Image (spheres, rainbow, N blue to C red):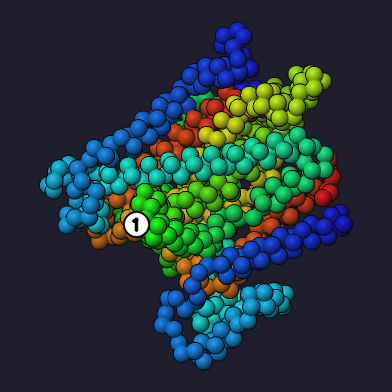
Amino acid sequence: MLPFLARRFAALLGVLFCVVTITFFLMKAVPGSAFDREKEPPPHIKEQMLKKYGLDGSPLSQYARYLGDLVRGDLRVSWKYRNRSVNELLADGLPYSFKLGALSFVLAAGAGVAIGALAAARKNSAVDFGAMFSALFFISVPTFVTGPLLILIFGIWLGWLPVGGWLEWKSVILPAVCLAAPYAAYVARLMRNSMLDVLSQEFIRTAHAKGLSEIAVVYKHALKVAILPVVSFLGPLAAHLLTGSVVVEMIFSIPGAGRFFVASIENRDVFLLGGVVIVYCTILVAFNLVVDIAYAVLDKRIRLHG
Amino acid sequence: MGKAAEPSTPGASPPNAGWAALRKNRAAYISFWLIVAAAIIAFAVPPLMPDVFKEPSDSTYLGPFDRSEGGLHLFGTDINGKDLFYRCLAGLRVSLVVGCAGALISLVIGSLYGMIAGLAGGRVDAVMMRAVDAIYSIPRLLFIMVFIAAFDPRIRGLLDAGRLKAAENGWEATQDWLDSLIPYSRMIILIASLGLVEWLTMARIVRGQVLVLREQGFVLAARAMGQSRLAIIRKHLLPNLSGIILTYLTLTIPTVILDESFLSFLGLGIDDPAASLGSLLKDGAQVINPIESKWWLLAFPAAIMSILLLSLNFLGDGLRDAFDPRSSKGR
């Protein structure tokens, strides 16, 4: 187990190194300088500013110094938000993103399992067809279609819920539903298939033969086994929700960390972009690692290597 | 096992049997004709529309079915007074072109990569597949965003330089051609980068299939007869891979369309004056406000996008049931 962990951790660092390098040089390849969007200051001030932001010297030396700062945990200062460090900006934004993600996680897993189990229990009924058609709909149609439509219907025509921002608890409902819907649909399909497999097995027939009620058979005996594939999807689900929230945060104007992605690209804000990419990639790769370990703990047949 | 396991006519070759199975799958069959119809409309109708519909005008934000200005505005007009029906068709065309072209690039890369890995086997195969796993684990779309920001101005500059050069030498045809390409530089780079990113699933599927095929008797026989590797690939592997490649091509098209719309929605893809379904959705989402909601600007692009993606997914699923012997969705 320990050598496995060490190797995977080294791989994680390797991936992060590549990510940082590619991002840095891609941003360096963008024509024009960070002064494009504002008046260029006199040469001596410009030189001072470039020096302060670590943008003087050859690209290679800039890169080396940036890597050094990163190792010390310093993500540097944002070019656009002059007096704020990237660490601070991310620390402000990430809690919102995490809260939204956590709520969507619970919604996607809970609703998905319930709908999938129900659809399997009533196979080929109207409930089943309805559930599976809407599942396909939400898998096919992206959040940037459903999000504005949700705002239009529930926020404006019906006026039930706030359309954006993060002022009261109600304002998180629409973004969470919007973010969770495609994954709830995926979980529901997964759950239905797995439930159908389980329901055709011998021990379910035995449970029926014992005279147990339909509810006890489906929701006590079968559910316990059928839920396993869903459990293994929870890791990727968490990772998907994280990246998916970038666009949802934009649609619903949530002050999370996702909005920095597009803003930093548009502003040529190299260090803010670098910080966001590093944090997101770290979380994603770490989730994958956690999932691998969880598989091994849950299922003794899987041997860890690589 | 999919439906392809029982060919409808005895002795039918796999592609024909697959087609027969597809025809029996009503949702996929209807979707197929819907997509064909949408493509024909998107390419044939816009040239027939009056020119006033395509240009900005003073009649902004007319509601749907408005007849007041220069004819029937089926979907109303947008912020610049352009006809929304025309814009939607133009956007649909761009999305279809980007989707198909990007998917084709991913097909070439993915199937070559998969075939090489599968045929080489052993250590080469292991390394190549680990690389695919590694690329899977990073958020690729985020890199595309940076990539486009970095290279779009360069490609534009390159085209511009080429145009000036052509003007110097008096090559008018080249100059005109490059001139007409400049507004599409974003689209070119989008197609290229999306194609370069979405080949991973194709590579995995093709490699898996090649691993199965290369152990089959007829491949062994061909090798024993002294056929060259290339001949084996061309005569024995490709025909047997065509069904599965076609299936995953259909499944890649909606993915690429989604990616493109995602980027356009964020303002990093196709932009004014060109349109894609994503950029139309962005424009529609921006004018939603409680005082005066111009719902048609959002509702029509959203509806077209939903129908297109649903049909492509139905068709892809149907093809997978028909052609992919390993899929178990036939339940």
- Residue A176, horizontal then vertical, whole percent: 49, 55
Q: Which residue is mark 1?
A: B272
Seen from this angle, which residue lies furthest bottom? A44
Q: Is residue A295 above or below residue A199?
A: below
Q: How many marks?
A: 1
The residue positioned 31% from the left and 57% from the top of the image is B288
Quarter of the image where one finds residue A15 = bottom right
- Residue A150, horizontal then vertical, whole percent: 39, 51
Residue type at mark 1?
Asp
The residue positioned 52% from the left and 73% from the top of the image is A269
Residue A252: in sight, yes or no? Answer: no
Q: Residues within 10 Å of mark 1 (few under 14, many from 20)?
A: few
- Residue B86, horizontal then vertical, whole percent: 27, 44
Q: Is residue A192 left or right of residue B119?
A: left
Image quarter of the N terminus of chain A:
bottom right
Residue B119: in sight, yes or no? Answer: yes
